[in-house]
Image: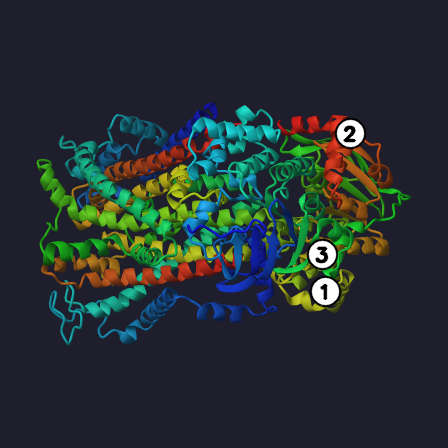
Amino acid sequence: MNLILKIVFQRLGLGVLTLIAVSAVIFSAIQMLPGDFASAILGQSATPETVKAFQHQIGLDKPAVQRYWEWIGGVAHGDFGYSFSSAGSLGGGHDRAVSDIIVPRLKNTLILASLAAVVAVPCALLLGILAALYRNSFFDRFVNSFSLAWISFPEFFIAYILMLYLSVKFQFLPSLASVSNDSGIGDYLVKCALPAMTLVLVTLAHMMRMTRTALVNLMSTPYVEMARLKGASRFRLICLHALPNAWAPIANVIALNLAYLVVGVVIVENVFVYPGIGQLMVSAVASRDIPVVQACALIFAATYILLNLTADIIGIVTNPKLLHRR
Amino acid sequence: MRKPVFDEASPLLEVRDLRIEGQSDDSWHEIVKGVSFDLKRGEVLGLIGESGAGKSTIGLASIGYVRPGCRITSGQVRYKGIDLVSAKDRDKRALWGAELAYVAQSAAAAFNPAHRLIEQCQEPAVIHGERGEKKLRDRVIGLFQKLSLPQPEALGERYPHQLSGGQLQRVMTAMAMSCHPGLLIFDEPTTALDVTTQIEVLATIQQIVREFGVAAIYITHDLAVVSQVADRIIVLRYGEVVEEAPTTKMLSAPEAAYTKSLWAVRKLDKQEDLAAKPILHLRDVDAGYGNSIKILDKINLAVPRGRTVAVVGESGSGKSTLARTIMGLQPAFAGTIEFDGMELPLAFKQRSGLLHRRIQMIYQSPDTALNPRRRVRDILSRPLQRHLGLSGEARRQRVAELMSMVELNTRLLDRFPSELSGGEKQRVCIARALAVEPELIICDEVTSALDQIVAEGVLKLLLRLQQQIGITYIFITHDLATVRAISDWIVVMHRGEIVEQGPKSQIMTPPRHAYTELLFSSMPEMDPTWLPRVLRERQSAGIAQNVSAEMSM
Amino acid sequence: MIAEEKVMTISKVEGPAGTRQRRLWRHLKKAPLSAWIGIAIVLAYMAVALLAPWIAPHGETEVVGGQYDPWSDEFLLGTDQLGRDMLSRLIYGARNTISVALMTTSIAFVLGTGLGLLAATVGGWVDQLFSRVVDVIMAIPQLIFALLLLSIFGTSVVNLVLIIAVLDSTRLFRVSRSVALNVTVLDFVEAARLQGEGTIWIMVREILPNILAPIIAEFGMRFCFVFLTIAALSFLGLGIQPPTADWGSMVRENATLINYGDITPLLPAGAIALLTIGVNFIVDWFLHITSGLKE
């Protein structure tokens, strides 16, 4: 057991290190800003004084390391600094904290992503297991070719097809997911339906294919053959011999696809004008509102790292060779 | 299932004109071409053949199983009158594990890493509807006891990766026996094991077939091994039966030419000759991995010029590390290596191009030792150009000369390695080593990946080259027949140390060091009485206990 | 063993050397329908991209009609929000979209496989350094990282190509490094070192030819990924900038038509999907034959 704890802690430590490195990379983005950036942000009317004041406000006159510590310290308390979009009103006291902009949108994104995950993960696992069980059958071949084509579709293609048929032609669902804080659960679900469905379709094919591959690999191991030659039924082979060894690959598949979902959110939110952080990030990039972009990037990256870390740790703690040492 | 009509007098297993195809490169090729044989109750049949003979495929088909990528195209396999070829999957499942059991080559891969051994050993009985945890448990522990596995009570609680390969193999035999099957298939059960472990597993298998009177098919490529357990032997080649006879007759008077050539392989014996000055001298050499993991301890060795030194040992003895240390790939931590009167830099990188040329190495597996994307001609030309500066016509001539030295047709020069057979590939490796006119060649298990007849050809070639151009060999091997065939001086290694060394005549005959004795007496001989004799001798000498103790570590 | 038996049969089937073209032809003849569809799609796209100025009825940025004109004899697929011919823009879009993606993938490929190969061959601290940097870059989702960098450097085609190429080269680095590592442990690489061969020779002559198949397949997969990423960025308005005709931006520019039940904006999206399907089908088939040969 000690060994497992040791490996888990090592892995956690590595995760923290990665997170620090990633935050440093995201932070140093501002360092790479071209010189005329301030005037670009402030527009034509910028005077040398306002530019200077702006640079002071975003702290470009302080050493980078000091600013990094201030920034990361703030982040740890949920303070991501102030949005540039209020820079025009320097000293006017209208500074908007990035966290105030992000929090409600983060909530929306999490609702959307979990809604999609709750549907996609079980469906994909089921389809993947079925395809592996009936390997080389018509069902398997069909699902295989179909999913190969499906993963080639851009997210917005799927989104617009759904929108065209489900909302414009047959008017089952609203085409815009304009939820607000006072929307009820029912309203939320109806408005989220199309974007969630798109995300489900986007991740389903990937996840299904990977589940199938993982299981097919396990089913061709000598110990599964041995169990077959003991007279074990197909059900017994899968449940008692393949599955106990499949947690690591399956956890990996799920984590990878949830991570993929995180990225898919950016596009889908923009198609359906859903007020989540994906949409926020894109508009922040367009207006070059760097603090908001940094905050969004950090949140996405942290989620991504956390998901992969979880999969790794599941793989470690379910590994029989580590669980039962010599 | 229909009640089968089965006459006690008729054979337990009848295989008739069995044909099996295997799929490769999207097309089907026949790999078993009409094989027929019978097996009586309580009889043990040995299936021997070289790689590609189809022996494993036939063994599995005898219990009605074909691996994915293979299919039975015609023929019958009748077990107690039931045709397993046409039987439904459900009917076969009722037999598998209960009546028909299988022992695989690699026990480490055939046990599920997620379950305790006892659970896996009880599984056949559980699958076939037996209930009563205590009863099943006792039965398995009883089997462990009978097979004298250490700590039979506690053993089952362990997981597969917690046991050594030899013990796992014996546990797998116990697992196969847990429902007292009528037919057991042993698929190369000792091939992956060291000789001192192999003898224990062989003893277990012999005990099982004698005491339970179970019929068995024993698949192997090793004649000496099969002659210990089989009542009757079938020799296979390219999916066809070459010869079939009772074991004693097969050993004493084989009829088919192919069988005779197989038998002749183990008879090579080089005349020992040690009258030569040393070309390589190792003094107090320590070596290992990284900076701290020491594998070789105080190695002292003198290699006479133009002669062969055989380094013998089991896996983990450090014999391959010794080869790599001499080459400078794993530089020695301490000690000196002297080559032709001058001290060698210990690391390969510090040695001159001339030294690189004078010491060459040939590898165990010719498949990985040749770049699959380069033609034979390029493989041989490159060292000629680099080290000898040959080009144009001179180089072409030298390449042709090298090919004839290793007895290969120059037609093969434009082929890729994948278009050559295993023996041809190894000959190309030898030619590549010879190209730069070396004085010392280190041969690391060069024949162990080859079939016996091919291996013999390679050994003869190496011997002839030594006579013709006086090359010195250091021959790393675990096979006694190879040692006898090629060596003048023998070095026995165990756990990184040389336990004994001396002229061949001295080492090959007792008295000798205890480990040498254990190692050499564990190498199976082509004599059906060998195993009981050795076991008896060991029992009286008390060696067997030592071996068991060592293995349970 | 079955594996050995298979090797035996293969070596018997294969003829003498110099049959590589014939072998390719043999594979082509046996290729599944999906592979043929893939080849046909890719060839058709290539033709359209190369011949764009001759096929397209109107110019790329030429305003020829009214805003959002419907499908008609004159404008087969109608016009866009500025009155440009949709069909012509689709055709020019093939040229722009594919060439940008291809350029990006090529840069990523050279950078990623080159460094991956070097890291695997040299090992030691070089390998450690490259691998750790790649780990950090890959810990940020690619699209997110691209958005961050685009917000810093601004949106232009050059920035887009360079940013995506650098980010994507990390995947190619990983793949080529790991397949190359599988080869470096083989005896023939050590044999070459024992012959005193240098690093460049070992990289180019010994290792590279043996990892070509998997990294070519990876090139195909990366192309699809890059193509979709650029399309996504263009769709978000952060990729290829107007007035250049590009499929991703065309979807965005004409998206409002969806609300009137018009499928025109789906056409450029469909064009992206179809090419990706084609490439994926070819890669899938290629992987199938190369893995089949190794068995």
Q: Would you call the spot at circle 3 few (<14 residues within 10 Å), some (14-19), or many (20 or more)?
A: some
* Left or right for A76, reference B550: left
Residue C79: name its quadrant.
Answer: bottom left
Q: Residue A19, how many percent across, how many down?
A: 36, 33
Look at the image and tell me whether residue A37 can be seen: yes
Q: Would you call the spot at circle 2 few (<14 residues within 10 Å), some (14-19), or many (20 or more)?
A: few
Q: Residue at x 59, y 35 (%)?
A: B170
Q: Nearer the viewer, mark 3 or mark 1?
A: 3
* Left or right for B264, reference B237: right
Q: Earlier in the sequence, mark 2 or mark 3?
A: 3
Indicate whether C70 appears above or below A266: below
Q: Residue A163, how many percent across, how many down?
A: 15, 54
Q: Secondary structure at mark 2?
A: helix
Q: Residue B278, how many percent across, how many down?
A: 86, 41
Residue B454 is labelled as 3
Q: Would you call the spot at circle 1 few (<14 residues within 10 Å), some (14-19), or many (20 or more)?
A: some
The answer to whether the residues at label 3 and label 1 have Cβ atoms under 8 Å apart is: no
Residue B391 is labelled as 1
Q: Between residue B466 and residue A137, name the one nearer to us.
A: A137
Q: Residue B492, how many percent across, how many down?
A: 77, 36
| Count of all numbered marks drawn on residues in the image | 3
Mark 3 — on which chain does it sit?
A: B
Mark 2 — on which chain does it sit?
A: B
Q: What's the residue type where badge 2 is placed?
A: Ala
Q: What's the residue type where badge 3 is placed?
A: Val
Q: Earlier in the sequence, mark 2 or mark 1?
A: 1
* Left or right for B285, reference C97: right
Residue corresponding to mark 2: B514
Q: What's the residue type where badge 1 is placed?
A: Ser
Q: Secondary structure at mark 1?
A: loop
Q: Between residue B442 and residue C243, name the one nearer to us.
A: B442
Q: CA distance from mark 2 to mark 3?
A: 33 Å
